[in-house]
Amino acid sequence: MPKQANSTRRHFLGLAGGAAVLGTIPVVTLRPAEATPATLAAAIRNVAGEAVVRTGKVKLDVPPLVENGNTVPMTVVVSNPMTPDDYVKSIHVFNEKNPQPNIGNFYLGPHAGRAQISTRIRLADSQKIIAIARLSDDSFWSASVDVVVTLAACTEEAI
Amino acid sequence: MSAARTIAVAALLIAAASSLPAAEIPQAERRSGYSFMAPDTKTMQDDDTANPGMLWVLDGEALWKSKTGASGKACADCHSDARASMKGVAINYPAYDKTLGRPVDLEQRINLCRTGHQQATPLPYESRDLLALTAFVAEQSRGMAIEAGADPQLEPFVNKGRELFMQRQGQLNLGCANCHDDNWDKRLAGSAVTQGHPTGYPLYRLEWQSLGSLQRRLRSCIGGIRAQAYDYGAPELVELELYLMSRARGMPMESPAVRP
Amino acid sequence: MASALINVPKKAKRGDIIEIKTLMSHIMETGYRHTAAGEVVPRDIITNLTCRYNGVEIFRADLFPAIAANPFISFFTVATESGKFDFEWVGDRGFSGTASASITVE
């Protein structure tokens, strides 16, 4: 059952979209589904397996109030010496409320010099973003950020 | 509409209805939409290798050199290096066209060239090719001060554009000036209202996730105030653009800009 | 017309950590949008970016629909020798894009 907790317009459109997907009303829908805590946990388990994911070492940089949920700049930095003996193997980013829990996986190595990646992401709603780094000793470290996403003042028709 | 937005708009209506007629923004207080943006978005515009609008400029550069139409000519065949020939062009648009006896915007000028000189079909509004060529030409004026509207032949059209900007319209009975002259320092549902200067068109709008023209933006604004938007290419949109550009005279071009 | 923008410093000293920025033109259609008639607009995204430095893979990214249109991805690498960076984007419907940039390392 979709969560009833928040009353944002995106959530309303998501619910309306749910009806359309079932094949009744032809509306243009924006958010037909939501990741659930279970799918998010499964996505994280996919990466970390049964290992404990500890908080720390990772810094996740996202504006706390986004300019526009369609394009949100995001930077992940892991404090790590990046030597052949101690480096970041990969960085995995997840979200809470988009239709899918995964955002991106980034594979580094000692030659990276600095464990830092930047990209632009889409956020369907105000939610938590989680970044998990896998180190060379196969330990997992994470950070999370709560981001507020508002709709543009006037949503538009297609061109 | 959400409750919050209804209240916001109602407050604006009350404020607008009871205030004096919209006063134009004093020259010294004019600010580009750039100044209203968050630092991350400003960075997106400032870095040519991170500004998605530059992808269209690159495409436009390729189109500039490709032969087209029955003439088999490329833009470059008449205009050679755009860096020289198109420098200072976009800052003077919309410009007066003698044959048509009215102003045309940059997109229309490009299509007039295509049909008149290249014997090619006009490119549809908001098509990738037309956006790319317009972005490429506009970028050649980046950093230069806007000069549009100075031509005396344009005066009646500037005035028409001003009327269109001021007039109340649509279900909400709002005119452009009610927000963009009177309330530019406030926010509407979390977004900055801004003064509405078209200093960076065509621009990459995060909401569109694409480059788009000023006509697209005007149409969505007019639809947003629940009025009937003019069709692409309508003289009203060109007159509005002409007024807006002349209202922004002296401000530097930023094309291709990035905006939320 | 796929076009890409790459930012790699033209010159660097051996051992410098340099930032590489990439921007690729792509709609990144999520697969979650519907037309007014109720049909799903099928997913069409870039799924992978790979960067090779003189033939050796130095960076790889898996992209999902949550990556914004016209994907911008930046990362770092240590400048070790002069040569070429090769970038390859792969995606749905057989999408393939490439770009390259040279560097002089002294």
Image (cartoon, grey):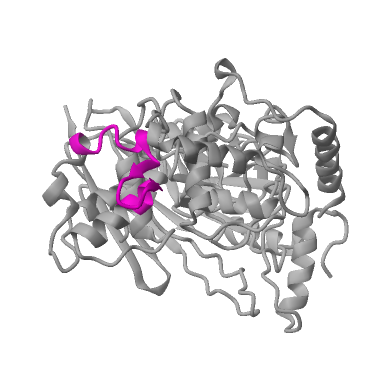
The image shows residue B6, relative to residue A111, as above or below, that is below
Q: Is residue B136 left or right of residue A8?
A: left
The residue at 78%/59% (across/down) is: A11
The residue at 55%/65% (across/down) is: C30
* Camera sees residue A137: no
Given the current orientation, which residue lies at the most extreme top position?
Answer: B28
The image shows residue A133, relative to residue B72, as above or below, that is above
For residue B92: magenta? Answer: yes
List x then y, in percent, for residue C20: 35, 39
The image shows residue A123, relative to residue C32, as above or below, that is above
List x then y, in percent, for residue B44: 47, 37
Q: Is residue B218 left or right of residue C58?
A: right
List x then y, in percent, for residue B175: 69, 42
For residue A41: magenta? Answer: no
The residue at 40%/41% (across/down) is: B94
Residue in the foreground of this view, choosing between C20 and B101: B101
Q: How many marks?
A: 0
The residue at 30%/27% (across/down) is: C16
Residue in the foreground of this view, choosing between B185 and A97: B185
* Camera sees residue A10: yes
Q: Quadrant of the N terminus of chain C?
A: bottom left
Residue in the foreground of this view, choosing between B241 and C8: B241
Q: Quadrant of residue B112?
A: bottom left
List x then y, in percent, for residue A122: 59, 52
Q: Quadrant of residue C47?
A: bottom left
Q: Quadrant of residue B137?
A: top left
- Over which residues does the magenta segment extend? B84-109
Q: Is residue B89 left or right of residue B6?
A: left
Q: Quadrant of the C terminus of chain C?
A: top left
